[in-house]
Amino acid sequence: MRISDAELSVMEIVWSAPGLGAAEIAGRIEGHDWSDKTVKTLLARLVEKGALRAEPEGRRYLYHPLIERAEHRKSMVGRLADTLFGGKAAPLVAHLADARDLSDDDIEELESLVRRLKDDR
């Protein structure tokens, strides 16, 4: 499932606080000057895509995620690796390491991850 950057802004709020209405979600969005109508359009798209469930409450709807944040991240990283690196993880990690200034802690975490992956095989 493809979720646009705008839709992802909405999903982040719903993941953090499930059960909000459109007005509450609109009020929590930072970095965008979106009207309630725009937010409702994004919410409707996410419901149509199966990312959210809209639960009626009186005259409004409360929104709940149907996909987990971790599941979505995993899917996005997989698409990125497939699209840019032929599905290979090592070039993706190497590119990230080159593009970012890795701290000693970052490097230690990566080494720990590699050891864990080796131990699990």
Image (cartoon, rainbow, N blue to C red):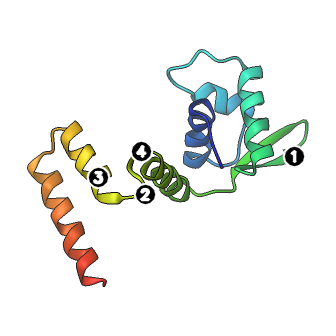
Q: Secondary structure at mark 1?
A: strand
Q: Label 1 amino acid? A: Pro
- Which comes before the other along the chain, label 1 or label 2? 1
Element marked by disc 4: helix
Q: Nearer the viewer, residue 51 or 25?
A: 51
On residue 87, which mark appears? Answer: 2
* Residue 71 shown left or right of residue 7 in the figure: left
Q: Image check: 9 left or right of 66? A: left
Q: Is residue 8 above or below residue 70?
A: above
Identity, as a three-letter code, of the amino acid under mark 2: Gly
Residue at 70 percent across and 47 percent down: it is: 19
Identify the residue position indicated by label 1 in the image. Answer: 56
SS class, disc 2: loop
Q: Which residue is mark 4?
A: 84
Number of other residues with Cα within 10 Å of mark 2, as a class: few under 14, some 14 to 19, many 20 or more = some
Q: Position of residue 37 (x, y in %)?
A: 77, 21
Q: Amino acid at mark 3?
A: Pro
Residue that badge 3 annotates: 91
* Residue at image point 48% right, 57% down: 74
Pair 1/4: label in front: 4
- The span from disc 3 to disc 4 (Cα, nearest Å) is 9 Å
- Whole-percent x, y for residue 49 in the image: 75, 46
* Disc nearer the start of the sequence (3/4): 4
- Depth check: give the residue in front, 36 or 112: 112
